[in-house]
Image (cartoon, coloured by chain):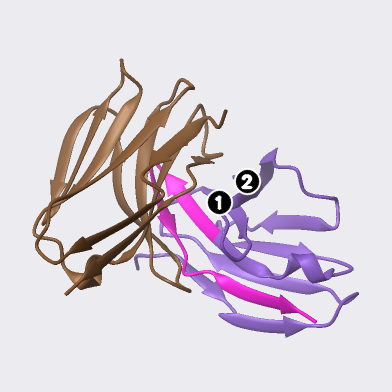
Amino acid sequence: KNEVEQSPQNLTAQEGEFITINCSYSVGISALHWLQQHPGGGIVSLFMLSSGKKKHGRLIATINIQEKHSSLHITASHPRDSAVYICAVVPCNYQLIWGAGTKLIIKP
Amino acid sequence: ETGVTQSPTHLIKTRGQQVTLRCSSQSGHNTVSWYQQALGQGPQFIFQYYREEENGRGNFPPRFSGLQFPNYSSELNVNALELDDSALYLCASSLGGVVFGPGTRLTVT
């Protein structure tokens, strides 16, 4: 079993829909990252969470440390949100443990 | 100056050659990590440097080596390149948060 599990692996939605991507992990962590990678591109850090909830524009990330679960939400989704979204956890240093990623496609 | 930069952006090498990839850390970040991302796969941890010392290493052979300089910039060196080394190489600097560079796409022919 992988230490970081993401779901779904693939998600296709219509523009404007509310999107949720989930991440569960099995190790103790000091922080969790949500990252975005566009096709052929580098990785952009969206959020770093150690507790609670963070919001940036149309993106919201939550984490429940007790349940070892985090979610990334996108409100009013747009085709430019199409990308791979990766959950990565930080066990005790910056050797990130990566989820497999969720490929999101938003259709106009 | 903010952000992490990597050079070159793209590189084509022949099997058996050596390559050096460079990374400039975000200002103030004293930790740098390198990752290899093969096409269609998640990033794999290569190694991490903290204040010029290697601070952790993933499952990569010794022909993958690195350096961190006093200004916290870093190099990744790969000797005796193999076809399977073709990948996107990502550098990330950290001090609390993590900032990723845009990556260097290496193609080995």
Could you say where residue B71 lies in the image, as x and y percent from the top left? 55, 59
| Same chain, labels 2 and 1 | yes
User: Which amino acid type corresponds to the residue marked 1 in the rendered image?
Assistant: Val
Instruction: Find out whether the residues at labels 2 and 1 contact each other: C-beta distance under 8 Å.
Output: yes
> In which quadrant of the rendered image does the C terminus of chain A lie?
bottom left
Range of the magenta residues?
B91-109
Q: Is residue A77 left or right of residue A106?
A: left
Crowd band around label 1 with a 10 angstrom C-alpha radius: few (<14), some (14–19), many (20+)? many
The quarter of the displayed image where residue A22 is located: top left
Q: Residue at x 44, y 50 (%)?
A: A101
Could you say where residue B10 lies in the image, as x and y percent from the top left? 60, 82
Q: Is residue A43 left or right of residue B84?
A: left
Residue closer to the observer: A104 or B67: A104
The residue under label 2 is B48
The magenta stretch spans residue B99: yes
The residue under label 1 is B32
Q: How many marks?
A: 2
Could you say where residue B13 lies in the image, as x and y percent from the top left? 78, 82
Most common SS among magenta residues = strand
Residue B75: in sight, yes or no?
A: yes
Tell me the shade of chain A: brown
User: Which amino acid type corresponds to the residue marked 2 in the rendered image?
Assistant: Gln
Kindly identify which chain the residue marked by label 2 belongs to. B
For marks 2 and 1, give the CA distance.
Answer: 6 Å
Tell me the shade of chain B: purple
Callout 2 secondary element: strand
The quarter of the displayed image where residue B105 is located: bottom right
Residue closer to the observer: A29 or B1: A29
Q: Residue at x 77, y 49 (%)?
A: B60
Say whether disc 2 or disc 1 marks the residue closer to the N-terminus: 1
The magenta stretch spans residue B86: no
